[in-house]
Amino acid sequence: MTYPELIKKLREVKEMGYVRTHRVGTTGVGKTLEDLLGITENNIPGPNAAMIELKSARNNASSMLTLFTKSPLPKKANSVLLQRFGYESARGNNRKELHTTVNATGYNRLKGHPGFKIDIHEDRINLITAQNETVGYWDKETLKNSFEMKLPKLLYVKAEAKGRGSNEKFWFNEAWLLNGFNFKNFLDLLRESVILVDIRIGQYPDGRPHDHGTGFRVLPDRLDLCFKCRKKIM
């Protein structure tokens, strides 16, 4: 299937209106769309012979999508965070962990006490404590490279959803071709707490920190705002 053929088929899917899900659960929207398009793999030919990733989401979905994962700098930031702020794992294995979600609009709570906040600057993002101490950071270039490695080019399809379980139905009525990291938009979305940061650090038996994937996350129906180039397909 060529890219123009895919877009033609996508518009035909829109004309079908609501279609019953092909799979129960959160992945139903993606499975249904791929089946309707006749796609068996999650990569499709792009307009310039590049590969484009296909993603789809329900409008107004409440579960967040991970844009990319990146440990904070400097190199040993995870070790310091785990040592200073980690707590005993609920698994009862005598290991520490640090699992917390951070935003830019206010300090979160960590075991009942003020925890962390995102502090935004022109070229980098700091992770600060309630005492205004920087305990980690991400610079602009690191975030740009991480984003473009994970999401270089995307055909993003939105669906209206109704019903539940096996009776859920989707109307795939909006699609965007997205590419290019827009750092200004990224910062704006962080400021508005549309993008959040999930810190997920565990510990190996020998005491070393285990990064489970500190992730920058966004609501699926706001994903398109993270890109510099946005072309509405339908």
Image (tube, rainbow, N blue to C red):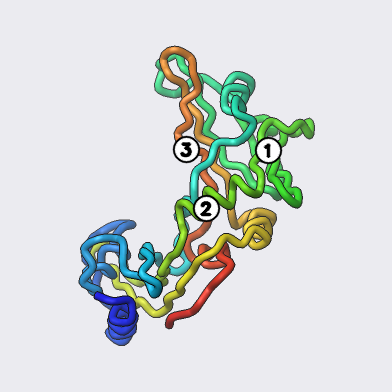
Image mark for residue 127: 1
Kindly identify the residue that appears in the image at 51 percent across and 63 percent down: 223
Inspect the image, locate mark 1, and give the three-letter code of the amino acid beneath it: Leu
Image mark for residue 147: 2
Q: 10 Å neighbourhood of mark 2: few (<14), some, or many (≥20)?
A: many
Q: Secondary structure at mark 1?
A: strand
Image mark for residue 213: 3
How far apart are the alpha carbons under marks 2 and 3?
14 Å
Q: Secondary structure at mark 3?
A: loop
How far apart are the alpha carbons under marks 2 and 1?
19 Å
Residue at the far front in the pictured view? 49
Q: Position of residue 107 (x, y in %)?
A: 70, 40
Mark 2 touches mark 1? (CB < 8 Å): no
The front one of 8 and 62 is 8
In the figure, 118 relative to 60: above or below?
Answer: above
Residue at the far right in the pictured view? 132
The picture quadrant where one finds residue 153 is bottom left
Q: Nearer the viewer, mark 2 or mark 3?
A: 2
Question: If you read the primary sequence from the N terminus, does the residue marked by circle 2 or circle 3 appear first?
Answer: 2
Quadrant where the C terminus lies?
bottom left
